[in-house]
Image: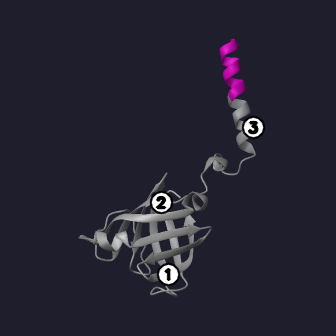
Amino acid sequence: MSRRIFAWLLLVSAGALCLAGVPGGFAADEPDDIKLLAGTWKPKEANLGDNKIDPMVLEMATVVYAGDKYTVKIGDKEEQGSFTLDPKKTPKTMDIFPTSGDNNGKTLLAVYELTGDKLTICYSLTPTVRPDDFSPDSNTLLVVKFERIKE
């Protein structure tokens, strides 16, 4: 057996042994989206179906994520609640459970994409339907693109 083949087999075997102790293979390398989401976010663009949300409304809004809790502020209105994420689904899913504000007691289904300091969420305004992607195909889908506020 040549040295090159032996070295390659050794590397493959060592890699397999390392992964054997990790449930799901590369699970240890998967990011913890709840931790990555933590912080304050500002909506930069939003569409409800074909309608763009007024930039003045977006300017008054912020979302703060802390653990599995969130707070949305739009002007002097505030909503709080909790959420769960499933980053293993494609697209990644978010279930939102408002505990105060206009949506108190509802469950909102959404999909999200988180890349560094950019976050896109497509919310369904129909309680039993989760969006398939990030296209605001109807007036029951709200797509919001956020940027993280550096503190």
- Give the residue type at disc 2: Ile
- Give the residue type at disc 3: Leu
Percent of width and height locating residue 142: 35, 72
* Residue 40 visible in image: yes
Q: Earlier in the sequence, mark 2 or mark 3?
A: 3
> Could you tell me what secondary structure mostly forms the magenta stretch?
helix
Q: Pointers 2 and 1 in contact (CB under 8 A)?
A: no
Compared to residue 18, the image places residue 12 above or below, namely above
Q: Which mark is residue 79?
A: 1
Front-most of 15 and 61? 61
- Label 1, label 3: how far apart the Cα atoms are: 48 Å
- Label 2, label 1: how far apart the Cα atoms are: 19 Å
Look at mark 2 in the image and give the residue it sits on: 149
Q: Secondary structure at mark 1?
A: strand
- The magenta stretch is 1-11
Front-most of 112 and 99? 99
Q: Which tag is nearer the camera, tag 1 or tag 3?
A: 1
Look at mark 3 in the image and give the residue it sits on: 17
Taking the image as shown, residue 148 lies to the left or right of residue 58, namely right
Q: Residue at x 61, y 56 (%)?
A: 32
Percent of width and height locating residue 88: 55, 58
Q: Residue at x 51, y 64 (%)?
A: 40
Q: Secondary structure at mark 2?
A: loop
- Give the residue type at disc 1: Glu
